[in-house]
Structures are given as C-alpha cells and as structure tokens.
Image: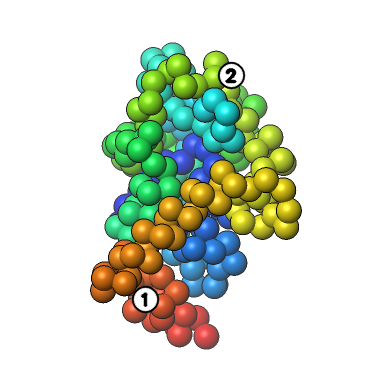
Amino acid sequence: MGDHTAFFYGTLMAPGVLHRVIYGTHDLEPWQKNSLTVRPAMLQSYRRHRVRNADYPAIIPHAQSCVRGSVVTGLTEGDLYRLDIFEGYQYSRQKVKVQVLKDVGLDQAAEDKTEVVEEVEAESYIWEDGEDTLEPIEWDFEEFKRDKMKAWAGMAEYGDTAEMDEGFADVDRAVAEQEKSGHDPMGGRGTNGHIGQQLKEAAV
C-alpha cells in the first residue's frame, strides 16, 4: 500500500516487533499481513554493535564490514512516522543502498550462502550517539529471538518489559495525540482508517 522501503537490522527484523510498532498490535488481520513485502538483505560498509545496557543494536559506518538484515517494502508515511518515534533521537533515518538476497535467512552465520538478487535504495536508522555508547561485540539476532522477542513483541506474560514497553508507549502516545487533533498519522491504514476498513472488507 505504501511506496517506502526500509532496511531493518535489529529488533524490527522480528515481525511481531515491526507489527506492534506500525499497527499497534502483533495480532494482525489477514489484510495487514499482506500489505508488506519482507526480503533478506545485506548492507555493505556498516558494522552492527550492541548498544550498551540495551537489548537492541545500532549500526555505524565501517568500510570493511557488512550487516545482514531485512528490507521491507510497502511502508507508508504513517509507518515511518511511528518508526521514527520508536527509534528515537539516537538514530537518524538515512538513505542507503542494500543488496537483496536470494534464499537466505537472517542467520548471521550464513554469510557464505549469499546470492545477491538486486540492489535497492532504502532508508535505515543510523546511530548518532557515538561509538562510546556501543559495545565492541556484534548484536546477536538469534539470541534476541530466543530470549527477548516475545517480550518485545508484547507477548510476554511476565518479566521485566519496562524498556520495550516505553518504546511502544512513546509511539502510542504520539499517535493518540495526532488522532485527537483530527490527523491520521497512519495515513488511513490503521484498524479504523479508511484504507484499513476497505482492505478488511475486501478480505471478508
């Protein structure tokens, strides 16, 4: 539905987290699941680090490195509005060129199995808060999926979820304020938006 493309390399590679940010829920309607296209991809000349005292990573320029992630097409202006808030002031959204990969998952150990299908322009969130706020080690997506993803997707029934709850709460508050003032920050694609209603009706 949208014409924006983004490259994600951290928590937003997890569908449940991405959906929670842009839709406000991880429990999607069928039409919502079909509105985005997600493909594995690689970003050259950047390096990914774990952010100190956090569950999420950041990327910074580095000539000899590359970052595996996912490229998502079909994003709207409303999606980017929510994503900008979720990512926060420590990141800036910048244009990058990413290599779309064929038949390769998000496993960081599979770098020898890459086959580039095409190169596309996308936007990604680049770290702006300095290298001293990053750990020297690589952020591990498999570890995140195993230990943290359910909590970040809003599916944990217990545990310390304060960090991820606050990130989602920032988005929810901003959207609520926009809606109160008569604006539709999701561009009609939210559950109650005109695009959302049309797609839901068409799927019945």
Task: Locate residue 177: give its quadrant.
Answer: bottom left
Determine which residue is flagged by label 2. 137
Which label is found at residue 120? none
Which residue lies at the image location 59% right of the left edge and 67% below the top edge?
A: 27
Which quarter of the rendering shows the N terminus?
bottom left
> In the rendered view, would you say 63 is above or below 29?
above
Foreground of the two, 100 or 174: 174
On screen, residue 182 versus residue 131, left or right, reads left
Q: Residue 139's x, y, as percent?
A: 58, 28
On screen, residue 21 versus residue 92, left or right, reads right
In the rendered structure, which amino acid carries the disc numbered 1? Gly
> In the rendered view, would you say 193 is above or below 1?
below
In the rendered structure, which amino acid carries the disc numbered 2? Ile
The Cα–Cα distance between marks 2 and 1, rounded to whole angstroms, is 42 Å
Determine which residue is flagged by label 1. 193
Asked if one can make out residue 106 in the rendered structure from this viewpoint, the answer is yes
Which residue lies at the image location 52% right of the left edge and 28% below the top edge?
A: 51
Helix, strand or loop for disc 2: loop
Mark closest to the chain's N terminus, 2 or 1: 2
Which residue lies at the image location 35% right of the left edge and 27% below the top edge?
A: 128
Q: Residue 47's x, y, as percent?
A: 46, 22
Which residue lies at the image location 49% right of the left edge and 72% below the top edge?
A: 31
Task: Locate residue 107: give its quadrant.
Answer: top right
Question: Crowdedness of circle 1 by 10 Å Cα count: few (<14), some, many (20+)?
Answer: some
Asked if one can make out residue 73 in the rendered structure from this viewpoint, the answer is no
Question: Crowdedness of circle 2 by 10 Å Cα count: few (<14), some, many (20+)?
Answer: few
Task: Locate residue 119: give its quadrant.
Answer: top left
Helix, strand or loop for disc 1: loop
Q: Residue 134's x, y, as percent?
A: 49, 21
Looking at the rendered structure, the number of numbered marks drawn on it comes to: 2
